[in-house]
Each structure stands twice: as C-alpha cells, then as structure tokens.
C-alpha cells in the first residue's frame, strides 16, 4: 500500500484493508502510521545482522564480505524493495521518529560489521580498529549505492553489477 500510494497517501484504513486485518488489530501493534513506517524501516535488520554475525566463522573475511554483498544486493533486487527503502528514507527527512529508527538501524549494522571484522583482526588479516570502522562505513555505503543503481538501471543484471564491484572489496579491505 505504501508503494502504491506513498506513506502520506496511504491511510491506516488502506493498510488494514490490504493486510486483511481490522483497524483495531492494526492499532494494537502500531500506535500510528509513523510506528508502522518505523517497523517497515527495520524489517530486514534481523536477517542482515545474522549474516553479518556469520562473518565471524568464515576463514576468509574478504570472501565473506563478497558473499554478504551478493546477499544484500539480491534482496534489494526484489520487486518494490528499493522503492520502499527510498520512501522510508524520504520520510526520515521529514519525521524525526523515523530518522531515529533509521539511525539506530544503521548504527546496529555498522557495529555488527566492525565486531565481525574485528574477530579476524587478531589473526593479522585485517587492519586497525579505525581502519575497520572506516571500512564498515564505506562498505555499507557502497552496498546501498549498488542497490540504488539497480533502481536507476532496471535492465542491469544483478550478477553483472556485483561482479563489477567484487574486485573492489579486495582492494578496499582494511
């Protein structure tokens, strides 16, 4: 419903009807539309955090980063995903509550990525703490940019896009 009408165009009644639930049930879980938007903003956080945490158990952290990038961009290639993310980001510019949720979400991803990479640091495979933090920021930024690229180049192959970028991971590693 948010993709069809936008956050401001879609009413809570529209959302309840589309979801096949009563208004009372919808309001039981979401106090208002901002809470619903905030929930939409974090819907993919748990699976992504699990994938980041799995980097700890991978012998080659750079290969793990490459695999994570493939997963992240593949999710972004799902129909409507980028449009919804863009809608959430635009709402965050207007709504401090949504902005706070997105900031928390991004901080959680960054912290998890730094922690996962730090687990490989002792083995001498990666750089300093500052290097890891800077790399994590750059990595997440580039993953977001690759996902947006799919929106702006709809005919572009996800495989080709990722393939063009993967060599950069080894060049940019901390």
Image (cartoon, rainbow, N blue to C red):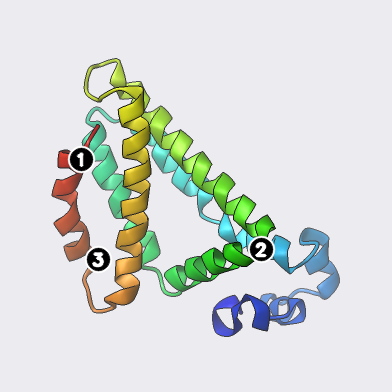
Q: Classify 60 as above or below 35.
A: above
Residue for badge 2: 95
Say whether marks 3 and 1 touch (CB < 8 Å): no
Q: Is residue 146 left or right of residue 15?
A: left
Q: Position of residue 128 (x, y in %)?
A: 30, 22
The quadrant of the image that shows the N terminus is bottom right
In whole angstroms, how far apart are the C-alphas of marks 1 and 2?
Answer: 35 Å
Q: Residue at x 47, y 34 (%)?
A: 111
Circle nearer the viewer, 3 or 1 = 1
Residue 57 in view in this figure? no
x then y, percent, for residue 137: 37, 42
Q: Is residue 127 left or right of residue 144?
A: left
Disc assigned to residue 172: 1
Q: Examine the rendering and report whether any part of residue 94 can be seen.
A: yes
Secondary structure of the residue carrying numbered label 3: helix
Residue 35 % position (x, y): 72, 60
Q: At numbered mark 2, what does the secondary structure look like: helix, strand or loop?
A: loop
Query: Looking at this rendering, what residue extends furthest in the top direction?
Result: 122
Question: Residue 5: which numbered mark, if any?
Answer: none
* Mark 3 vs 1, N-terminal side: 3
**Picture layout, residue 126 above or below residue 96:** above
Is 101 left or right of 148, judged from the image as shown? right
Q: Where residue 112 sits in the image (x, y, percent)?
A: 46, 35
Taking the spot 60% from the left edge, 67% from the top edge, the residue there is 91
| Nearer mark to the viewer, of 1 and 2 | 2
In the rendered image, which residue does mark 3 sit on?
158
Residue at 29 percent of width and 31 percent of height? 58
CA separation, marks 3 and 2?
A: 32 Å
- For the residue carrying disc 2, how many other residues have a C-alpha within 10 Å: few (<14), some (14-19), or many (20+)? few
């Amino acid at each position: 419903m948010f993709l069809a009408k936008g956050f401001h165009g879609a009413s809570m009644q529209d959302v309840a009807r589309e979801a096949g639930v009563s208004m009372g049930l919808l309001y039981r879980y979401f106090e208002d539309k901002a809470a619903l938007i905030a929930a939409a903003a974090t819907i993919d956080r748990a699976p992504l955090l699990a994938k980041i945490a799995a980097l700890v158990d991978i012998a080659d952290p750079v290969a793990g980063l490459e695999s994570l990038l493939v997963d992240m961009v593949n999710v972004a290639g799902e129909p409507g995903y980028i449009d919804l993310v863009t809608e959430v980001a635009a709402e965050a510019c207007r709504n401090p509550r949504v902005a706070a949720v997105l900031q928390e979400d991004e901080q959680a991803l960054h912290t998890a990525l730094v922690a996962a990479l730090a687990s490989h640091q002792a083995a001498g495979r990666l750089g300093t703490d500052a290097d890891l933090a800077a790399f994590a920021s750059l990595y997440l930024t580039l993953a977001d940019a690759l996902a947006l690229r799919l929106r702006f180049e709809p005919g572009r192959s996800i495989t080709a896009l990722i393939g063009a970028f993967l060599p950069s991971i080894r060049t940019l590693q901390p």
